[in-house]
Image (cartoon, coloured by chain):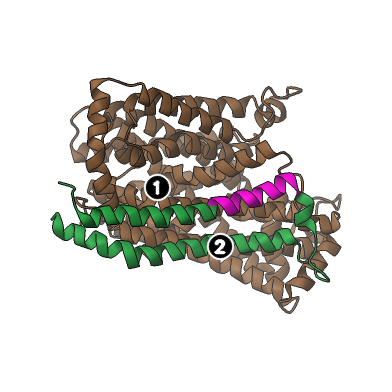
Amino acid sequence: MKNSKDYDLLLSERKKIVSRLLTIIIFSYFSFISVIAFNPNFFGQLIANTFYSIGIVFGFLLILLIFIVTLFYVYLANKTLEPLIKNIHKQFK
Amino acid sequence: MQIESSTNTTAIIMFTAFVVLTLMITYWASNKSKTASGFYTAGGNISGLQNGLAISGDFMSAASFLGISGLVFLTGFDGLIYSIGFLVGWPIILLLIAEPLRNLGKYTFADVASFRLKQKPIRTLASLGSLFTVILYLIAQMVGAGKLIELLFGLSYASAVMIVGSLMILYVTFGGMLATTWVQIIKAILLLSGATVIALLVLAQFDFSFNDFFAKAVDSHPKLDAILAPGGLISDPISAISLGLALMFGTAGLPHILMRFFTVKDAVEARKSVVYATGFIGYFYILTFIIGFGAIVLVLNDPQYLQPDGKTLIGNNNMAAIHLSHAVGGDLLLGFISAVAFATILAVVSGLTLAGASAISHDLYSNALGKSVTEEKEMRISKYATVALGLLAIFLGIIFEKQNVAFMVGLAFAIAASTNFPILLLSIYWKNLTTKGAIIGGTAGLITAIILVVIGPVVWVDILKNSSPLFPYKYPALFSMLITFIGIWVFSITDKSKQAQKEKLLFKNQYFRSQTGVGIEKGSSH
């Protein structure tokens, strides 16, 4: 019953998108946490002639990255996954 | 002290307006909440944007608004570690959980876990996991609420807890998910606006130069530029990873968050709601960071906000944001923020209570007890459960008044990450998961998380006053999650029973539905 080219394509496309984005998130979050655990002084350094510490800059960038990843996933899902899901719905109604 | 007398008028007027408005919404919602799907999921007709706001409302509790800005006020950078941890759970939910959850479940996440596994044991365990999480969270919110309201409105602690408890029982029993969602949406908008105003007023004093702002904060804080660097919050790698795991995966196991995904009509809307929620929550954490630093600059050295010793804040560090609102916006803003904090508590406890009541009526009573229950009966049970949970919350709130309850939210996240999340994740993605594996692994993780917190530094030493902890780390998630996953794996792959084979065979169809949404129920409007 579940033999459908669209379904196979959906699974492989989703796997590709999800694994890449998940890697980005897990890698960047645990890098952030690891610096705090192993080398906190690095995050304490100030960027030349300012009061911006490297930790605060990376922290804000990470918040931004998390949001961009969710936005990007929805963009990719609407572009590549949704048409496939629509076809499958037609096929199996 | 100044706070009580000055806030009374503005805060009480604004809070009364909020209560009147939300009770009107509850009255309007009560007609639409008479069916089970109306009560549990608002009929599945909430839009992605509305749901995103409501989810962010669940997350922006008084504990996180006041707690995180207070932590930033106290430690600077370290507050950011928590914010980022709470936020990073959202892409995980989006990428792994949100769509399959919507496609497989109806009212609770136990629907998903029991889709192909045995109803009775799985629902019992899932509802236990939910109830533990909800009750721990509820106690923490109630105690925080009582103290905050006592301070801001001059009410006695017990009456504050009773007001919160009674209003939440009203919202949930009569208005169900629809009223709870709208209470949450209104509060989220109020809180985001209030926090934005505080942050803008703070930054305006520095002509919107972050550099001057940080410079002045370093100048004002006794720790000087150490506030821009990681401090003592996380000192060893094990704690770092353990806390990281609890925050990252705990969010994806919180029952009051998961149940919100059933209020939208399909997976597309579920996806959208996470993006909105992540945006609002991320923005909110940036605001709390600015507010915490703002309090360092404007509150820390101003005697009117300090105890007579000149060192500690009136109230405690969690009052940093409240004092700051007065420092930048006078009595009017203080009144507004106090009312919003009160509203926030109400909205969050309502969502928690609804999640707890659904676990009792939908999972425990009507499915796990195996009785054939009509929808009417289930609805009646859910209302009794709401009242019972409300009374329990009031009772526990009063009992725990003098206790340190800060560890309870941490424990709730650890349980969510070690029981609810693994069962949910593996039931969606792992073909070989069996009932036996899920029950043994999930129970082991639940017990491990509780025991490790009890014998760890926070409860064993700080609360029970023993001299040294039996388990050295504050955060148990690394160990309890490992035990859950290993337990589930071992007892699933060695399970050769007929039941296990049947469950494995059912996976293919379940996976098809989880990925495509073919066969799901849409909103109840048709």
Relative depth, front residue between B328 and B458: B458
Q: Is residue B12 visible?
A: no
Q: Is residue B165 above or below residue B344?
A: above
Q: Secondary structure at mark 1?
A: helix
Chain seen in green: A
Q: Colour of chain B?
A: brown
Q: In the displayed structure, does residue B222 sit left or right of residue B323?
A: right
According to the image, label 1 marks what residue? Answer: B258
Question: Residue flagged by tag 1: what amino acid is it?
Answer: Leu
Question: Going by the picture, which residue comes out furthest to the bottom?
Answer: B207
- Residue at 72%, 58% in the rendered image: A55
Instruction: Return the residue nearer the eye: B158 or B77.
Output: B77
The disc numbered 2 marks a residue on which chain?
Answer: A
Which residue matches tag 2?
Answer: A65
Is B381 inside the magenta-drawn segment?
no
Q: Residue B84: which disc?
A: none
**Disc 2 residue type (three-letter):** Leu
Residue B456, x across and y down, in percent: 66, 28
Residue A55 in sight in this render: yes
Q: Residue at x 58, y 41 (%)?
A: B143
Report the magenta residues as a range: A26-39
Magenta segment: does it hold A29?
A: yes
The residue shown at (71%, 51%) is B78
Chain label for disc 1: B
Dominant SS type (magenta): helix
